[in-house]
Image: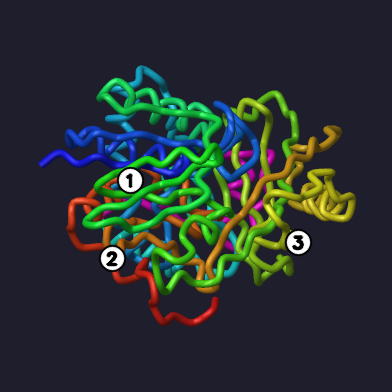
Amino acid sequence: MALDVLVAGGGLMGASAAWRLSARGHRVTVLERFGPGHDRGSSHGTSRIFRLAYAEPSYTELALRALPLWRQLEEESGRAVLTLTGAVDHGPPEVLERLAGVLARAGRPGRRLSPGEVAERWPGLRADTAALYHPDAGRVHADDTVAALLDAAGRRGAEVRHGVRVTEIRRTGGGATVVTDTDEALVADAVVVAVGGWAPGPAAGVVNGLPPLRVTQEQPVHFPVPDALEWPSFIHHPGAGLRLPGGVYGLGSVDGVKIGLHGVGPVVDPDHRDRTPDPAALDRLRAYAEEWLPGMAGTGPEPLTCLYTTTPDEDFVIDRQGPVTVLAGCSGHAFKFGPALGELAADLVEGGPGLPRFALGRTAPTR
């Protein structure tokens, strides 16, 4: 039976849910607070990492579910959004052994490399102690992805409304009523809440067990090197020769080689944040590049800011209570899974099971 579904939020998560719901024949309306292509949340920019290599096998499985959906999205939208360049993980050998084992059990290739072999193949990149190369990885163009998802959903009948802010969600009968900032009341069979750092507002009072969401302002940088699109994505894991908490990630993009620290920015209010780059954060990344990225020599980094919204255990929240499905805490490493998480949201809206790892009210240790 086709349902009337309102999706609050038109970033990656909301757009992915809208695409998969509309593909199943549901009547979908997306309500996005900001304009098309905005940079106020977590889904903008030109680059995100796609990879299969995870220490937690369930994330590798989820990325494998996403891969054919990425290709389907490209076919439906006519946009190329995923480029496989391969990826290099480097750092403590025990970390890489774990990653290699998960890839092997999933039947995916991975090759161990010495730092010398890394330097020979990618002269701009210096590896630490040991390295693992896996070809099923690369980059996703973030802005183009969101546009492609909304376009593909629209071709299947979804309506996308920009400049509409959801202020309240109420359960009404067997469905829900969504109230907007213009006091418009919209009635639907189901609601998907996918508003990133703003999730506690619309979700308050309609779902229980939403874990604390930490909203931070992160500051990656782009180094405008001419061969940026030839770079693999890479993750430098902490330990061994690196003492930066969370490690460093990097990848090529049309804006240069992007590098950043993982989840170390200051806590902010998403409505009232100063997006002025932090000189200390910029200096840390510049110093890192001087030591580990010889390919950046002679270039100046260009900083940018974005929002991270994370849970204490860094696992996502993707669950349903009654007519309300919540997608939250998806920053930091969720982009690569986007279409698969949209499929999971569609399952939940239709009354299907979710994944215990992403459940509301779960009990999990802080990482």
Quarter holding the N terminus? Answer: top left
Q: Dot 2: few (<14), some (14–19), or many (≥20) neighbours within 10 Å? A: few
Residue, disc 3: 266
Instruction: Classify residue 60 by image quadrant.
Output: bottom left
Of 3 and 283, which appears nearest the observer?
3
Residue 232 appears in the rendering: no
Q: Kindly identify the residue that appears in the image at 37 percent across and 66 percent down.
A: 358
Question: Disc number at residue 224?
Answer: none
The answer to whether marks 3 and 1 mark residues whose Cβ atoms lie closer than 8 Å is: no
Residue 88 screen position, x and y as percent: 53, 50
Mark 3 vs mark 1, CA separation in Å: 29 Å
Secondary structure beneath dot 2 equals loop
- Residue 117 painted magenta: yes
- Residue 118 painted magenta: yes
Q: Kindly identify the residue that appears in the image at 75 percent across and 50 percent down.
A: 272
Q: State the residue lying farthest toward the left.
A: 1
Secondary structure beneath dot 1 equals helix
Q: Dot 1: few (<14), some (14–19), or many (≥20) neighbours within 10 Å? A: many
Q: Kindly identify the residue that appears in the image at 30 percent across and 60 percent down.
A: 104
Residue 79 screen position, x and y as percent: 40, 20
Whichever of callouts 3 and 2 sits on the residue coming sooner in the sequence is 3
**Which three-letter amino acid code belongs to the residue tagged 1?**
Gly
Q: Dot 3: few (<14), some (14–19), or many (≥20) neighbours within 10 Å? A: few
Question: Disc number at residue 342?
Answer: 1
**Which three-letter amino acid code belongs to the residue tagged 3?**
Pro
Stretch in magenta: 107-130
Of 162 and 284, which appears nearest the observer?
162
Residue, disc 2: 355
